[in-house]
Amino acid sequence: MPRETNSGKRERLDHLLRALKRAYPDAHCELNFSNPLELLVATILSAQCTDKLVNRVTPALFRQYPSAVDYAAAPLADLENAIRQLGFFRNKARSIQGCCRALVERHHGQVPNTMDALVQLDGVGRKTANVVLGNAFNLSEGIVVDTHVTRLSNRLGLTRHTDAVKIEQDLLTLVPREDWTLFSHLLIWHGRRRCSARSPDCLNCELRQLCPSVDKASAKRRVPPARSAAQSLP
Ligand code: SF4
């Protein structure tokens, strides 16, 4: 198959964007929050965890710790206890407290609104910073690349990379800046609702006509692993 040119890819991306916007007109961040600090904490909690589970824990957590000062001063055991339902709760409690102590010491208890300042905070990488900037501050400095965006970008032929930083670089050259935040929501929604890791629903997919992996992603999983020569011996 001839390799797709960059302009061909851009044109296909325009169609993909339109189809995704039609399919998910309400796509948005599925973590519940009412201010930048809540979103920062919820995003740290969401590592290796579903948003639904995080949303079950955060209402009580946000009531108990309404400000960065509250997290910074809390006994670590209490903070761990408040998020015990989530995986890696000990590490997450330490990250949240470290992050909030830095907010108090360096930012008057406020969440900064720049990539450079955010990624200096404990437990905050580029992905978390992009979530906070795009959704709490409405600033587009990049594209959130999580597990869904990684999988979908590859299946849709928008990148050949598996490294999040390289995927983001590829996407930034294709997606119009005004859609950077929305684009990751659209891919995440599509990944959750249609194109799951294990069983992509290609038959009913809104992107069928535009996707180079159509009917291949699911077929791949049905092929039994090849047996090695040694395994084939009686
Ligand atoms: S056609 Fe299949 S592999 Fe492609 S996006 Fe849709 S569900 Fe995923």
Image (cartoon, rainbow, N blue to C red):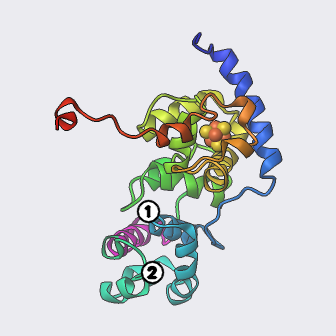
Residue 150 image point, x, y percent = 51, 42
Residue ID at (54%, 38%): 219
Residue at far top of view: 2
* Residue underneath mark 1: 47
Q: Secondary structure at mark 1?
A: loop
Q: Quadrant of ligand 1?
A: top right
For the residues bearing labels 2 and 1, Cβ distance under 8 angstroms: no
Measured as percent of width and height from the top left, residue 231 is found at 20, 38
Q: In this picture, is 54 found above or below 200?
A: below
Give the farthest residue toward the front. 234
Count neighbours of disc 1 (C-alpha within 10 A) and say few if under 14, some if 14 to 19, many if 20 or more.
some
Indicate the secondary structure of the residue bearing disc 2. helix
Q: Could you say which is closer to the camera, residue 90 or residue 39?
A: 90
Residue 146 visible in the snapshot: no
Q: Main secondary structure of the magenta part?
A: helix
User: Position of 130 compared to 185: left or right?
Assistant: left
Tell me the kind of residue under disc 1. Ala
105 magenta-colored: yes
Residue 32 seen: yes
Amino acid type of the residue that numbered disc 2 sits on in the rendered structure: Val
Residue, disc 2: 69
Q: CA distance from mark 2 to mark 1?
A: 23 Å
Name the residue located 63 percent from the left edge and 16 percent from the top edge: 6
| 161 left or right, relative to 186 | left
- 81 versus 229 height, above or below: below
Count of numbered circles on the image = 2
Residue name at image x 61 percent, y 67 percent? 31
Is 95 placed above or below 200 here? below
Q: Which mark is residue 158?
A: none
Quarter that holds the N terminus: top right
First in residue order: circle 2 vs circle 1: 1
Magenta region: which residues? 92-109
